[in-house]
Amino acid sequence: MATNFDDILADFDNQVNPNNRLTLTKLKRQDLQLLQTVWINERMAPELLTYEHELIERILSRLRDQVEFIELNSIDIQNTDKDIKLKLVVIESELGRVNFLLRSYLRTRLSKIDRLTVFIRTSDEFIQRLSEEETIYMENHFKSLVQLYNNLFLNTMPEQLQSLDDESGGISMIEQPDWNKPVFIRVVNDIKESIIVGDEEVELEKEGIYLLRYSAVKNFVHNRDVVLI
Amino acid sequence: MSLPNDLKITLSPQEVEFLTESEMITILPRYSMNKLELITDDIPKLMAMHRIQVPLWYALILKQQRKCSIVPPNWLNHKSLKEFFQSEVTELNQFSKLPHNWLELSKIFFENAADDLSDEPAKLKSLIQDLKELRLIKVKKGLSLINESHLQLDNLSILEINEIRPFVVEVMGKLTKLKQVITNEIDEDRLEDRDNDDDLME
Amino acid sequence: MYGDLALKLINEAKRTQNLEILPIYQDEIIRNIVRETKELERTLNFLEEQQKLDSNNRIDQCQLFVSHLCMRRNKRCLLAYERLRSEKLDQLAWENIEPEILNHYESDYFKNYSETLINYKSSFPELDLSGSLEPPKDVFIDVRVLKDAGEIQTEYGVFNLTKDSQFFVRKADVERLIQQGYLQKI
């Protein structure tokens, strides 16, 4: 879906006639669809996915316009004009819905960042997936956690036990994503090659729903040929 | 903690309902209203008695204010549900092609727009219930086929998936780990066998 | 026995998991675990010296191994305990609730994390990130005033809540008044 989407965005930018409302409406709907998809993907994937910077920015900018509209018109709500009243109810309701989706998406990410901090910090690939704000959040949070552990007990422990990314003794302290976590997926695009799960070969049929380990479909989740459910 | 623990495992029923409310549905307005520009959609001008497609959450606001009736989807009637039930019975190895949100959508209809249904809601409700139970039996039967590799469950709705999610995720996860342990042991055996063979060669 | 104290701490952590509030910080147990771990280190050093003299002593080898494990286990238990507490503190920071009695360092941590949050949230001024994680329902509702509640100021103007009057309001604006019994949803 991501690739289709870029095309449409380009089309839209190329529109000579800015009054082509239909395209804008379509774009708005696609953004909602995409936001719902990335939200559920983020909720269900064991790893942290790439931050959807452009999508979030587009939605936020429309959201700001809408808030402004409400500020200009809200005083009329006790007005007898039923039409305005209904209009505001609809606009506020939608605002609440979008706000919820963004909130849940962002907080899902923070919760994963908290859990996987030490792992993320060791991997350039994962650091790239964070937004600027998330990186600052992660570093600050990590710093205060280390400070807390150090002040409470680590500083007074034997020297060999003072680190936080200890991998000795057979147990790694670094929490990794559970790559083999079983997930439910729906196949949304044609996938030509079959995939290998354990020692079985599986063909993923379009529109099919499967339960399988995340590692087997990770790349298809990244390029959105499959979505998590 | 930025996300409560129960939300880390699954989508809540409220969230599933929320997603269904984002989908489009046909309404018959009893009221005219100007076009509305929203963040995630634009709602065209409403004209009384002209059918139009709108997001379900919007339809529900109008419905609540008695400004429209909602056109039920073509499967939410006595005849179609009977047919679906029949096909569930005859095709024991697959789920009938009900839309992916059939459970959520019918629930929303029963709660908010029961008067728009063409058949008696109580009867439809019991048909839905029958379908749900029958499909659950099939799901459970299908789960007996669970292995560490994969399970195909086409046409299952999110609510139905949610119902089995905690259980199957746990079981399949355990099976995967077991399989890994066994495979590792076999590999080690093979290595040892080879060592022994080498010994023989000498 | 080695490890008993750590077990006690883990039991405490487990109990904390299901509590609404944050129980008191187990200062004494923590200090004793650290002391025990240092003792283990001394044993370890001694055993390592012994090993140099006689590397075939199986009993020493075994003791060496067990001491190592005990030390690591102690550390893991300390971290598990504090991690759980810090997560509780994070949650309180999200809900904007000041925790009551805290260890000095924990209180520092709470302040730091609250600041980190405020900083993150300020990048999204148009969103209410601390809002409910349940999907919204009925953004606007009709309410009847059950007892006089004075004036409230909302984005939609000022409401004078006198008994028996009715209003059409944003649910979020009056949620508290409904809970307190001033208003009733119609």
Image (spheres, coloured by chain):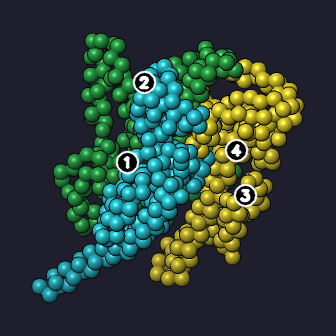
Chain colours: A green, B cyan, C yellow
Residue C92 numbered mark, or none: 4
Disc 3: which residue: C19
Rendered residue at 56%/45% (across/down): B112
Q: x, y (%) of residue A9?
A: 31, 25
Q: Earlier in the sequence, mark 1 or mark 2?
A: 2
| Identity, as a three-letter code, of the amino acid under mark 1 | Asn
Q: Secondary structure at mark 1?
A: loop
Q: Which mark is residue B74?
A: 1
Q: Nearer the viewer, mark 2 or mark 3?
A: 2
Name the quadrant containing residue A23.
top left
What amino acid type is highlighted by mark number 2?
Pro
Residue C136 point in image, percent of width and height? 59, 39
Nearer the camera: disc 1 or disc 2: 1
> Which subunit holds the residue at mark 1?
B
Do pointers 4 and 2 mark residues of a single chain?
A: no
| Residue at (30, 32) in percent of width and height | A5
Chain under numbered label 4:
C
**Marks 1, 3 in one chain:** no
Marks 1 and 2 belong to one chain: yes
Both marks 2 and 3 on one chain: no
Q: Could you say which quadrant of the image residue A123 lies in?
A: top left
The percent position of residue A186, horizontal first and vertical second, equals: 33, 52
Disc 1 and disc 3: Cα gap in Å?
A: 49 Å
Residues at marks 1 and 2 touching, judged by CB atoms closer than 8 Å: no
Dot 2 corresponds to which residue? B44
Which callout, 1 or 3, points to the residue nearer the camera?
A: 1
Residue type for callout 4: Leu
- Going by the numbered disc 3, the residue's amino acid type is Leu
**Marked residue chain, label 2:** B
Residue B168 lies in quadrant? bottom left
**Which residue shows up at 64% across the image and 55% down it?**
C84
